[in-house]
Image (cartoon, rainbow, N blue to C red):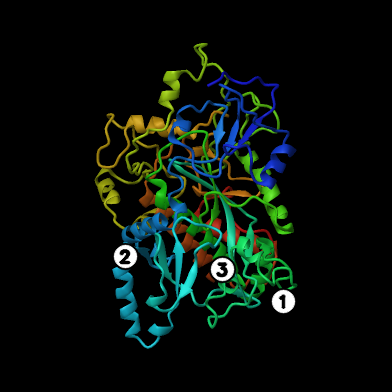
């Protein structure tokens, strides 16, 4: 690996392995004054490597402080249909109904017998013969290989696939089926830090939805790569217009008149759904620094960054600029003195604590030795054999006695923990106790594990993600909901994280009931709802409510 690049050199970005990439990404990089990577023998002078597929494990071992990559090791487990369904099934078994947002899934060919048994059970019912099922290959995208069927005889099982019961009554817009494409950035899973962009896309089918014609993909599949080849793509369709995409802003304006206060609750449920999906793979993802994931939800490891229509440019171009601002990547230069992260807010709470992140590091350590030597790179490298471990429940409450501590840890359901969270103030969180040795005992992290997580939270450009900003532009932090007031790294197991999401959902439902008579349909109404939610959660003014623009 080459030595640190000089401060007066331009920021260098690298695309895939062949130097080609999506048009909007190239345009945004050029607007920021960045230079495309020109490979030369023995030279690795690049700052950002953007790859459509996952990186080999060896790439993470040699990352310098001034280099960044757009994938996290094992961060793509939720992007395969089969592994996502297994993770959600496991989480549903542990945490119960809060994970009931996805229909039951059958993995083929492994669970073919179970699928046949379910078919037989439904056929004994009156409506069983009319049930529609959907078949999806596990490792394909853009709608390839997806089809609907009613009879088991129609099922073609040539490759690994998943089968689910089709949602027969989806939400329609002027008779057209649509889905949402949301953009999520995860700078790290240990601890989980996630941001979601406020603007996004709605993708429409180009033929009106009906169950009388289940073999017409333009009625049932909303993938834009498929529908832009449809015969009615360019027509001016009722309310939808030409093409097949809207922005979330357009969707929100259409829904708010139909749903009223419930529309606000739907977006909070979407926020919770995204967080719960990320938590499903959090425990199996190792701590790494200078890496991030950029997802398209429903979960795509490499969402399209081309400009097929005006809506794409409206959403994606500012989204990419603000993504790089969020990550602390500079407009031009490469030196670490220029790699400053986004401003860290001064968090005002009952104790008025300052949550400033650590400052940017220089190219040399305090001892005068050059950074990035072999031993130091080995210490911050990704562990090749990662063990799925649960970090401890480290945020304990001041008024919980030692005798009650074991009782708190013994709760089995997220609702039990949520009830305990509801009874505590957000400002009464104490510092986590120091572990006494270097082992994992009873699911609790050792000092070595904590150091690895702390190292992963502190990027080479000085951004500390366990104290990440609330928002940059339209990138809004959706988890954690609030940071603790102490300067120690907050360790939280998945169980407690699920409990926080459950608490948010319950509070959002209560706010919707209490404020359902608010008549205004603009940002004034949103402000009333947001203020009520903050008060109910006792999170203070720095808690960000995720909502699409209006």
> What number is the disc on residue 221?
3
Q: Contact, CB < 8 Å: mark 3 with mark 1?
A: no
Q: Contact, CB < 8 Å: mark 3 with mark 2?
A: no
Query: Which residue carries the number 2 mark?
Result: 111
Q: Residue at x 54, y 56 (%)?
A: 297
In the rendered view, does 222 fall on the left or right side of 272? Answer: right
- Mark positioned earlier in the residue sequence (2 or 1): 2
Which residue is at the front of the view, 260 or 549? 549
For mark 1, does the 10 Å Cα neighbourhood hold few (<14), some (14 to 19), or many (20 or more) residues?
few
Q: Give the CA separation, mark 3 to mark 2.
A: 25 Å
For mark 2, does the 10 Å Cα neighbourhood hold few (<14), some (14 to 19), or many (20 or more) residues?
some
Helix, strand or loop at label 1? It is: loop
For mark 3, does the 10 Å Cα neighbourhood hold few (<14), some (14 to 19), or many (20 or more) residues?
many
- Mark positioned earlier in the residue sequence (3 or 1): 3
Task: Please state the horizontal and vertical placement of residue 461, each as a whole percent of the image.
Answer: 58, 29
Q: Give the CA separation, mark 2 to mark 1.
A: 42 Å
In the rendered view, does 450 fall on the left or right side of 354? Answer: left
| Outermost top residue | 368
Query: Which residue carries the number 1 mark?
Result: 238
Helix, strand or loop at label 3? It is: loop
Residue 480: tell me if it is visible: yes
Task: Please state the horizontal and vertical placement of residue 251, each as a whole percent of the image.
Answer: 66, 66
> What number is the disc on residue 539?
none
Which residue is at the front of the view, 195 or 56? 56
Task: Please state the horizontal and vertical placement of residue 232, each as a whole percent of the image.
Answer: 69, 72
Which image quarter: residue 333? top right
Nearer to us: label 2 or label 1: 2
Q: Contact, CB < 8 Å: mark 2 with mark 1?
A: no
Q: How many marks?
A: 3
Which image quarter: residue 176? bottom right
Helix, strand or loop at label 2? It is: loop
């Amino acid at each position: 690996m080459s030595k640190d690049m000089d401060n007066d050199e331009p920021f260098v970005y690298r695309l895939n392995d062949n130097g080609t990439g999506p048009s909007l990404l190239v345009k945004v990089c050029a607007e920021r004054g960045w230079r495309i990577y020109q490979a030369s023998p023995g030279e690795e002078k690049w700052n950002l490597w953007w790859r459509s597929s996952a990186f080999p494990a060896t790439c993470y071992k040699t990352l310098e402080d001034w280099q960044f990559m757009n994938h996290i090791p094992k961060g793509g487990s939720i992007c395969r249909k089969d592994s996502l369904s297994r993770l959600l099934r496991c989480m549903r078994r542990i945490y119960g109904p809060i994970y009931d947002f996805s229909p039951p899934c059958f993995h083929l060919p492994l669970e073919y017998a179970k699928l046949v048994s379910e078919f037989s059970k439904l056929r004994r019912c009156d409506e069983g013969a009319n049930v529609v099922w959907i078949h999806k290959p596990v490792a394909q995208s853009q709608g390839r290989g997806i089809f609907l069927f009613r009879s088991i005889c129609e099922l073609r099982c040539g490759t690994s696939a998943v089968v689910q019961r089709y949602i027969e009554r989806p939400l329609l817009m002027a008779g057209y089926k649509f889905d949402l494409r949301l953009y999520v950035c995860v700078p790290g899973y240990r601890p989980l830090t996630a941001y979601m962009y406020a603007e996004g896309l709605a993708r429409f089918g180009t033929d009106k939805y009906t169950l009388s014609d289940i073999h017409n993909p333009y009625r049932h599949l909303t993938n834009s790569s498929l529908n832009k080849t449809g015969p009615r793509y360019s027509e001016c369709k009722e309310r939808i217009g030409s093409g097949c995409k809207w922005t979330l802003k357009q969707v929100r304006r259409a829904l708010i008149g139909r749903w009223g206060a419930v529309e606000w609750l739907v977006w909070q449920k979407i926020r919770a759904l995204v967080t719960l999906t990320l938590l499903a793979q959090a425990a199996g993802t190792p701590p790494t620094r200078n890496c991030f994931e950029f997802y398209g939800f429903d979960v795509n490891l490499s969402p399209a960054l081309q400009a097929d229509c005006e809506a794409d440019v409206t959403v994606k171009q500012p989204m990419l600029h603000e993504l790089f601002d969020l990550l602390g990547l500079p407009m031009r230069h490469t030196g670490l003195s220029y790699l400053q992260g986004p401003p860290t807010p001064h968090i005002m709470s009952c104790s008025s604590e300052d949550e400033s992140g650590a400052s940017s590091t220089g190219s040399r350590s305090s001892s005068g030795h050059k950074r990035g030597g072999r031993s130091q790179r080995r210490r911050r490298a990704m562990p090749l054999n990662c063990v799925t471990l649960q970090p401890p429940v480290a945020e304990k409450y001041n008024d919980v006695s030692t005798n009650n501590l074991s009782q708190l840890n013994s709760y089995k359901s997220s609702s039990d923990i949520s009830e305990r969270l509801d009874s505590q103030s957000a400002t009464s969180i104490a510092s986590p106790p120091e572990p006494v040795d270097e082992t994992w005992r009873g699911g609790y992290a050792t000092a070595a594990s904590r150091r690895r997580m702390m190292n992963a939270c502190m990027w080479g450009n000085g951004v500390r993600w366990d104290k990440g900003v609330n928002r940059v532009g339209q990138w809004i932090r959706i988890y954690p909901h609030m940071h603790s007031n102490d300067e120690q790294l907050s360790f939280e197991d998945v169980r407690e994280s699920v409990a926080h999401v459950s608490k948010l959902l319950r509070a959002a439902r209560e706010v919707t009931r209490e404020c359902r008579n608010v008549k205004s349909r603009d940002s004034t109404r949103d402000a009333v709802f947001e203020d009520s939610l903050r008060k109910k959660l006792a999170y203070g003014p720095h808690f960000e409510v995720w909502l699409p623009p209006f």
